[in-house]
Image (spheres, rainbow, N blue to C red):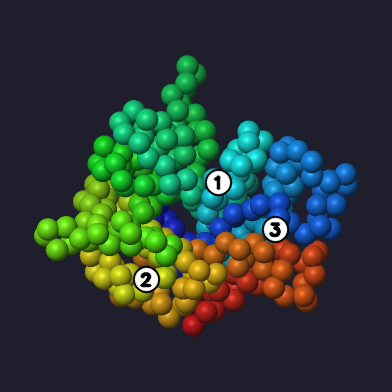
């Protein structure tokens, strides 16, 4: 069973195809919570990292029996320097300890040995004198396909060797995605269609019994017609779907992203879950974890009907 099949099994168990995005920044933290964690306030990167991690722990505790996975966007941790990256790793470990599948949203890539270093760092292991060790140890990473197979093969190799997976950017949810992704080739295919065809090829050696490979695709909820088309084009690729909620994507928009059995897709929400308390006064600042849990359950109901 590859990692995408494990993800599908967990989705089925919880009946919830939702991944909570831990895009945590200090601006999202309730003042009262910060006061409890750091009575003197946030003044340094170390302070910020400590507060972010404490917030993440509370969120993970509230969500671990509701959602099958969390997605941890590295940019929100890199901006706090080394202290932030330490918390990034700690967040991944803690989420896994609580039974969650963890996606490292890093969108990394390069060629050859450099790509292999990225792959080893996030979804593999690094060779050390006393044996290989996991640096960040996520279950799945997001990657950029722009460098072609030279940049993707090291990640696919890491998937096979470590039982991990990747989501390749195919048709992203942002408004300007078409500036490049909709460019058309002489054979009539768009760039995103060509990437989709490659995703099917790149994942062939990692397909499990269900047919899904360890190489999945990022397909934005804001492009519903393309999502339906890409589901047909990539029958063996699990979809990670951003763009639901704040970016305008709806449950109706993503109906066609699932396969005929209602599988093969997990939908991300970040601010809509982790900062849900800001939208409903009934929770108050101290009810932020309950608000996040209820938002994830509401999202489940919206998507599953």
Closer to the N terminus: mark 2 or mark 3?
Answer: 3
Compared to residue 135, the image places residue 65 above or below, namely below
**CA–CA distance between discs 2 and 1?**
24 Å
Residue 243, horizontal then vertical, whole percent: 47, 66
Residue 171, horizontal then vertical, whole percent: 34, 61
- Mark 1, other Cα within 10 Å: few <14 / some 14–19 / many ≥20: some
- Kindly state the secondary structure of the residue where label 2 is placed: loop
Q: Residue at x 71, y 38 (%)?
A: 45
- Kindly state the secondary structure of the residue where label 3 is placed: helix
Residue 137: numbered disc: none
Q: Give the camera-side residue of 180 and 281.
A: 180
Q: Residue at x 11, y 60 (%)?
A: 187
- The residue at which mark 2 appears reads as 223
Closer to the N terminus: mark 3 or mark 1?
Answer: 3
Does 43 sit left or right of 206 as displayed?
Answer: right
**CA–CA distance between discs 2 and 3?**
28 Å
- Mark 2, other Cα within 10 Å: few <14 / some 14–19 / many ≥20: some
Quadrant in the picture for residue 159:
top left
**CA–CA distance between discs 3 and 1?**
15 Å
- Mark 3, other Cα within 10 Å: few <14 / some 14–19 / many ≥20: some
Quadrant in the picture for residue 294:
bottom right
Judged from this view, the residue extending furthest toward the right is 39
For the question of whether residue 238 can be seen, the reply is: no
Residue 75: numbered disc: 1
- The residue at which mark 3 appears reads as 28
Compared to residue 185, the image places residue 256 above or below, namely below
């Amino acid at each position: 069973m590859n990692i995408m099949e494990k993800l599908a099994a967990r989705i089925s168990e919880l009946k919830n195809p939702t991944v909570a995005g831990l895009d945590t920044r200090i601006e999202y933290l309730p003042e009262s919570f910060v006061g409890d964690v750091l009575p003197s306030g946030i003044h340094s990167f170390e302070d910020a990292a400590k507060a972010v991690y404490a917030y993440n722990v509370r969120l993970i505790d509230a969500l671990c029996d509701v959602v099958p996975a969390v997605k941890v966007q590295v940019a929100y941790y890199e901006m706090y320097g080394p202290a932030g990256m330490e918390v990034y790793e700690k967040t991944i470990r803690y989420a896994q300890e609580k039974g969650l599948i963890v996606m490292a949203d890093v969108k990394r890539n390069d060629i050859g040995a450099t790509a292999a270093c990225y792959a080893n760092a996030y979804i593999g292991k690094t060779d050390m004198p006393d044996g290989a060790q996991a640096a960040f140890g996520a279950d799945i990473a997001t990657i950029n396909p722009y460098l072609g197979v030279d940049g993707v093969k090291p990640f696919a190799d890491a998937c096979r060797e470590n039982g991990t997976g990747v989501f390749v950017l195919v048709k992203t949810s942002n408004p300007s995605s078409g500036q490049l992704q909709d460019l058309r080739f002489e054979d009539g295919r768009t760039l995103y269609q060509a990437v989709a065809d490659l995703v099917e090829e790149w994942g062939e050696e990692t397909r499990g019994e269900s047919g899904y490979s360890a190489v999945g695709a990022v397909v934005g909820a804001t492009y519903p017609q393309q999502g339906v088309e890409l589901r047909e084009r990539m029958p063996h690729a699990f979809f990670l779907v951003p763009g639901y909620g704040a970016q305008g994507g709806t449950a109706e928009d993503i109906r066609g992203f699932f396969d005929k059995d209602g599988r093969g897709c997990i939908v991300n929400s970040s601010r809509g879950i982790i900062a849900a308390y800001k939208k409903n006064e009934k929770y108050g600042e101290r009810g932020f974890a309950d608000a996040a849990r209820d938002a994830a359950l509401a999202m489940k109901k919206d998507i599953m009907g």
